[in-house]
Amino acid sequence: MAKIGSVMTPVGRKALLLGSGELGKEVAIELQRYGVEVVACDKYPNAPAMQIAHRSHVFSMLDGDKLREVIEQERPDHIIPEVEAIATPVLKELEAQGYNVTPTANAAWLTMNREGIRRLAAEELGVTTSPYRFASTYEEFAQAVEEIGIPCVVKPIMSSSGHGQSVIKTPQDIENSWRIAQEGGRAGAGRVIVEGFVNFDYEITLLTVRSTSGTTYCQPIGHIQVDGDYRYSWQPQPMTTAALTSAQEIAKKVTDALGGYGIFGVELFIKGDTVIFSEVSPRPHDTGMVTMISQDLSEFALHARALLGLPVPSIQFYGPSASRAVVVEGDTDKIEMDNLEQVLAEPGVQMRIFGKPEVKGHRRMGVILATADTVEEARAKAERAYNALRVNVLPR
């Protein structure tokens, strides 16, 4: 029987967030709706989830000793990884000692780098993927590019938001792509994946929820990425019945292998009725921010509900919706989101400002959400709102 006691008492529940960005912030809000004590962790102070959590800790989660120290100090009921860059061997050790990791420590370990999840999907589960090779040295990398063929995509095995990703279009790009991958990896220089180009019509994120009710799927989410970083998403992405059925079967096969309760962002390429597996995140997905306006339970609400051991009997979809990421460029700790009265002038438009403390280079600082009668109208409405936005990047 699931129960939650009074917050911040011995009978209450405590959740430790490993990663406190915009996605972690929404998870923290949803957990607090159930009276859960939330402790937020990240590598920098004043991260979005820290601003609304009960307490916070600042440290590199790749520091296994510090990670263990914080977990043993807090003794949480739920350890919730919200980023990839975590000392997952420590999580596996702590899980063996009785700690509860969402969805499981093994899932966090397998998906923290592209090699673990790709080998699981392609080599153990027999799921169709793009052709791939892994390389640890420049010599292995050059050989992998030759075997896969040009054009091909290069990514660090551990990165997110497009960092370190590039496309090799000519032999002259090989050396530069290796350099980009080495500089962009979450854990520094290291191993990379070389992927062959996939001929696809579109790509989707299929948010897949594992809960005490079984496996439930959100409507498929279409999206556009720029340099590997999400810019637009919409729901639902039109698909044939055969493609959707195949996508759900692949998502279930992969998430069943990972196990545990929570939401998974399963990324898939679609060509006609053929579905090709790309990646999976055992946590809310950035493209899934559209669910904050499209569903009765957002991906964050679903994650919180599932990991707490509560049922998810159904998901009510409201109708065609879209999101538009607000990416800011510059080097500043002072940003103004301006002209908001025009941004929010149309009915069916919402905005979230994440509250990140600074920008160095480029950074996602907010998202615009919209609903309409069709996906095309929702996307156009979100774009009009985005175009009305004025971002003032002020000097430090």
Image (tube, helix red, strand yellow):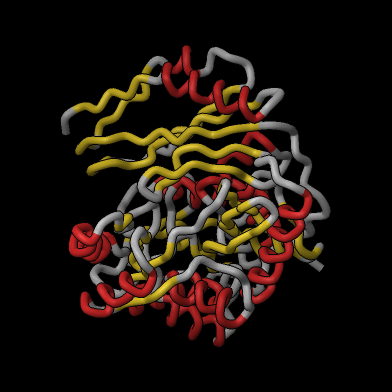
What residue is rendered at 25% in x and 73% in y? 142
Residue at point 62%, 45% (across, down)? 221
Vertical placement of 283 versus 47: above or below? below
**In the rendered image, the vertical position of residue 134 relative to residue 247, given as above or below:** below
Name the residue at 55% across, 67% down.
Answer: 129
Residue 312 is situated, as x and y percent measured from the top left of the image, at 78, 55
Determine whether 285 is above or below 148 in the image: above
Percent position of residue 236, x then y: 68, 40
Look at the image and tell me whether residue 61 can be seen.
no
Q: Is residue 380 visible?
A: yes
Q: Is residue 354 left or right of residue 121?
A: left
**How many labels were placed on the picture?**
0
Quarter of the image with the N terminus is bottom right
Quadrant where the C terminus is found in the figure: top left
Viewer-closest of 86 and 272: 272
What is the x, y in percent for residue 210? 71, 64
Left or right relative to 303: residue 215? right
Pick the front one: 316 or 141: 141
- Would residue 240 be found to the left or right of residue 300 on screen? right
Residue at x-position 56% and y-position 59%: 283
Quarter of the image for residue 99 reads: bottom right
Residue 102 appears in which quarter of the rendering?
A: bottom right
Give x and y (percent) for residue 136: 28, 79
In front of the other: 136 or 301 = 136
Q: Is residue 38 left or right of residue 262?
A: left
